[in-house]
Amino acid sequence: MANKRTLKRCISTICGELLAECMAASLYGHNSQAAEALIYGILAMENDFIRRISHPEPGMKAKKYYKTLREDFAAHACEIVDQIRDM
């Protein structure tokens, strides 16, 4: 596992890219209300995962915890990409 700082930076970068794609889709005449809701969802997701990095669950092994965290983040990111594609 990389250190926490690198993991936080990667999450922030990916969320920034998702925000840029969502804003671009809303500028090209797609549903702006759905884009706005999706933007708030991306920001909430970023905050949630960064908090989860800073405060791991007690009693759970670190390697397993961060592996599930990365898998959860990847699943949420793919879900958001699908929502952007469907706008």
Image (spheres, grey):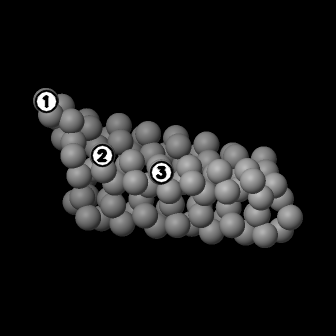
- The residue wearing badge 3 is 44
Expressed as whole percent of the image width and height from the top left, the position of residue 62 reads 19, 41
Label 1 to label 3: alpha-carbon separation: 26 Å
- The residue wearing badge 1 is 59
Q: Which of marks 1 and 3 is in front?
A: 3
SS state under label 2? helix
Residue at image point 64% right, 52% down: 38
Residue at image point 36% right, 66% down: 9
Tag 1 or tag 2, which sits nearer the N-term?
2
Identify which amino acid the numbered label 1 is placed on.
Gly
Q: Is 20 left, or right, of 69 in this rendering?
A: right
Say if mark 2 contacts mark 1, CB within 8 Å: no
Q: Is 12 left, or right, of 35 in this rendering?
A: left
Q: Can residue 45 be seen in this view?
A: yes
Q: Is 5 left, or right, of 83 in this rendering?
A: left
- The residue wearing badge 2 is 52
**Residues packed near mark 1 inside 10 Å, few (<14), some (14 to 19) or many (20 plus):** few
Q: Is 33 left, or right, of 72 in this rendering?
A: right
Expressed as whole percent of the image width and height from the top left, the position of residue 53 reads 28, 50
Residue at image point 21% right, 42% down: 56
Expressed as whole percent of the image width and height from the top left, the position of residue 34 reads 73, 50
Vertically, is 59 above or below 79?
above
**Residues packed near mark 3 inside 10 Å, few (<14), some (14 to 19) or many (20 plus):** few
Tag 3 or tag 2, which sits nearer the N-term?
3
Identify which amino acid the numbered label 2 is placed on.
Arg
